[in-house]
Image (cartoon, helix red, strand yellow):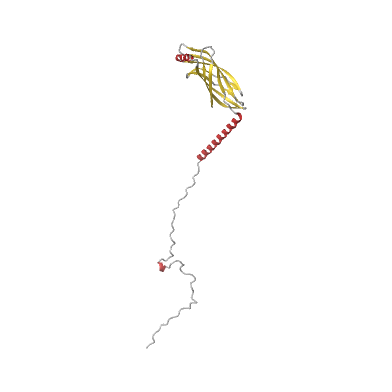
Amino acid sequence: MADQQRIHPVPDADPERSPRPTAPLVPRGSFRSSEKGDPEQQPPPLRRTIPYSPSKPPKRRSCCGRCVCCTCCFLFFLIVAIAASAGILYLIFRPKIPKYSVDTLRITQLNLNNDNSLSATFNVNITARNPNKKIGIYYEGGSNLSVFYAGTKLCEGSLPKFYQGHRNTTVLSVNLSGQTDNASGLLQSLQAQQQTGTIPLNLRVKVPVKLKVGKLKLMKWKFLVKCRVNVDSLNQDSVIRVRDSSCKFRFRL
């Protein structure tokens, strides 16, 4: 019988001689392809993306707004400066209001003409007082003085040009003349009022002036004076007594 062929196992090579792997073939924390069925490393987890919205640039103040702001500031400081200057001038010069009074009234003509017009010629003496110590008054041309009865103008004239110094009193004699149409009823009213012994008249004065403060001559102003005068009669060429008079004064540019 032939010898039965035997197969003997061949011993493995020396384990000391075979090279050992120095690093794992698959990184830690990953899975082999045999375990997950994915030949490559697992992709990183998905991250939530926030949509990008660009921030709005800060608004810039327009040039017009800056101009308005600068103008308002300039006007404010200008008003403050003017008010401060006016206050200083007031404390230095202590201005006082001029005073006026009607002293005498003389009528040289008050006749009703054939055409029912009334002709009137008056002469009025007015006293002007300047009580200021350091302020003078230049009375300029272009003034007007009118006499009214019951709202109807009887006559008018103008004041002379002159300079009134400090603490000065000046008496002005002013001639007035005028003519009123359709005045038959007006004359009858005057005659009836004369029987009562008191005839109310109104005098209105408008005069441009310039004030002299120290050595400085200021801009032109306009004095407005209203006087209420009660006289006893309106007879021609006779002594007319002024029973009382009161004047109000104001001024404007």
- In the rendering, at what x and y percent does residue 69 appear? 52, 39
- In the rendering, at what x and y percent does residue 191 appear? 47, 13
Q: Is residue 67 above or below residue 117?
A: below
Q: Is residue 84 left or right of residue 30?
A: right
- As drawn, the residue found furthest toward the front would be 196
- As drawn, the residue found furthest toward the top would be 114
- As drawn, the residue found furthest toward the left would be 1
Quadrant, the N terminus: bottom left
Locate residue 102: give its quadrant: top right
Locate residue 130: give its quadrant: top right
- As drawn, the residue found furthest toward the right would be 215
Which is nearer the eye, 213 or 238?
Answer: 238
- In the rendering, at what x and y percent does residue 99 appear? 56, 23
Q: Is residue 125 above or below residue 56?
A: above
Which is nearer the eye, 59 or 103?
Answer: 103
Q: Is residue 54 above or below residue 232?
A: below
Quadrant, the C terminus: top right
- In the rendering, at what x and y percent does residue 47 appear? 44, 58
